[in-house]
């Protein structure tokens, strides 16, 4: 398909999907693809989930949108579900980058300080503030001066973090698993040091859960998986299962710094988006689903490690829950092309990592089908290279 009217900022594959059911997508020719991407961590409940479809239809027939000039009980309802027993308050927006922009503004407004420590290979969004927090030069290149005050240090490096802290440091801003950077989990011992350093220096700890949140690691939040309590959490992607919605959760002690007029969003928290989020949280935040994600994640890691143990092209297989990365020595493009030909959708991360983000509702049978295709493809690509 030729794009005549769109800017060329996306490198699109020549496939158009027009229908989805459970964990499968169907293209314009009726071909069926097993989805191990969830729309980049968005469709955690898969496609055409009947309860979610009904919730959206019901709200669409009532009222789509009212501005934040008026009360909205649906916002209160969803915020309560997201917060649980945490001492936090919510702000709703439309995307992950907006949630991170809100966090950056709140950090600086509350602390009166300018410096925010983030990490190399991180990804926090593409607007100027969140892009500046992102630790990838490729995201910055060509856009002039980025927002000042961000310092990037190596991930999982305690000494580098200690060295970067100054009197002007306001916060540490991190992903618990770097997604776009290569599916790199935070080391638990290092994270404990991060928490201690934030406490001892009076720094805010901000966790970007745009990709890891909403059940992806086997808990509603990855911060629960790591057993930490951030001051600020940002969410999006899986929160609406495809309906654009984001959120920032902040400790109630920060609320006075975000009074009337300090920040806002025209569409943030509108009723159509929140009707989706309400149903999504209710369906995901259950012991049955979250326990199954944890079990399937462990199964996937073991299955891949066993099946690829003799594949020299594989450097590492890592992740938590259903967020898994397979790092290759080289040759990722032929692998991705072969998997597409096998009707399996996967993602790349960094320069050489196959990223797997299957829907959280995937069955073990469908999961095994996809994992076998990955093992077979990597084995065939290696054999072809040896010839």
Image: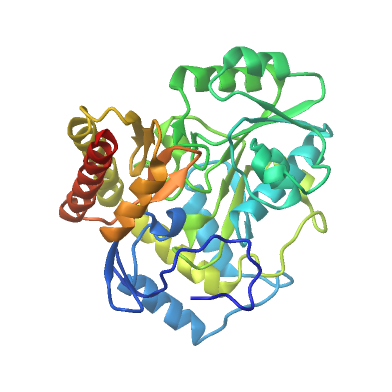
Q: Is residue 237 above or below residue 206?
A: below
Tell me if 292 is positioned left or right of 211 in this view. Answer: left
Residue 255 in sight in this render: no
Residue at image x 67%, y 14%? 162
Above/below status of 154 relative to 145: above
Residue 329: x percent and y percent? 39, 30
Q: Please state if 77 lies on the left or on the right of 4 as rendered.
A: left
318 relative to 241, above or below: above
Q: Residue at x 53, y 32 (%)?
A: 229
Of all residues, the one furthest to the bottom in this rendering is 61
Extreme residue in the front direction: 387
Within the image, what quadrant is residue 111 found in?
top right
- The residue nearer to you, when weighing 234 against 129, is 129
Residue 173 in picture, x, y percent from top left = 64, 34
Residue 355 can be seen, yes or no = yes
Q: Nearer the viewer, residue 90 or 135?
A: 135
Percent from the top left, x then y, of residue 89? 61, 49
Tell me how the rendering is colored.
rainbow
- At a point 26% along the width and 33% down the height, the residue shown is 386
Closest to the observer, 342 or 298: 342
Q: Residue at x 44, y 22 (%)?
A: 188
């Amino acid at each position: 398909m030729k794009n005549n009217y769109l800017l060329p900022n996306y490198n699109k594959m020549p496939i158009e999907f027009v229908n989805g059911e459970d964990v499968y997508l169907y293209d314009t020719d009726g071909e069926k693809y097993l989805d191990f991407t969830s729309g980049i961590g968005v469709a955690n409940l898969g496609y055409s989930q009947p309860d979610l479809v009904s919730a959206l239809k019901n709200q669409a027939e009532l009222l789509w949108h009212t501005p934040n000039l008026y009360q909205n009980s649906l916002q209160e309802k969803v915020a309560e579900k997201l917060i649980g027993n945490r001492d936090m308050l919510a702000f709703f927006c439309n995307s992950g980058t907006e949630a991170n922009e809100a966090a950056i503004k709140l950090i600086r407004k509350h602390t009166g300080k300018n410096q925010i420590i983030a990490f190399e290979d991180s990804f926090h969004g593409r607007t100027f503030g969140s892009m500046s927090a992102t630790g990838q030069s490729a995201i910055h290149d060509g856009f002039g001066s980025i927002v000042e005050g961000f310092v990037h240090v190596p991930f999982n490096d305690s000494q580098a973090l200690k060295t970067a802290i100054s009197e002007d440091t306001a916060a540490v801003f991190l992903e618990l698993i770097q997604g776009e950077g290569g599916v790199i989990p935070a080391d638990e011992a290092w994270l404990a040091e991060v928490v201690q350093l934030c406490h001892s220096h009076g720094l805010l700890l901000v966790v970007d859960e745009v990709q890891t949140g909403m059940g992806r690691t086997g808990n509603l939040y990855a911060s629960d998986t790591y057993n930490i309590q951030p001051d600020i959490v940002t969410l999006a992607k899986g929160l609406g299962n495809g309906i654009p919605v984001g959120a920032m959760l902040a400790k109630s002690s920060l609320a006075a710094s975000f009074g009337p007029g300090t920040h806002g969003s025209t569409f943030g928290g509108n009723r159509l988006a929140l009707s989706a989020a309400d149903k999504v949280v209710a369906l995901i935040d259950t012991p049955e689903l979250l326990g199954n994600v944890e079990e399937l994640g462990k199964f996937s890691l073991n299955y891949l490690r066993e099946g690829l143990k003799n594949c020299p092209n594989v450097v590492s297989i890592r992740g938590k829950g259903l967020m898994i990365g397979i790092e290759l020595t080289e040759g990722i493009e032929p692998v991705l092309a072969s998997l597409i030909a096998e009707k399996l959708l996967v993602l790349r991360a960094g320069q050489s990592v196959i990223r797997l983000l299957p829907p959280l509702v995937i069955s073990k049978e469908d999961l095994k089908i996809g994992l076998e295709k990955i093992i077979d493809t990597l084995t065939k690509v290696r054999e072809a290279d040896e010839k």
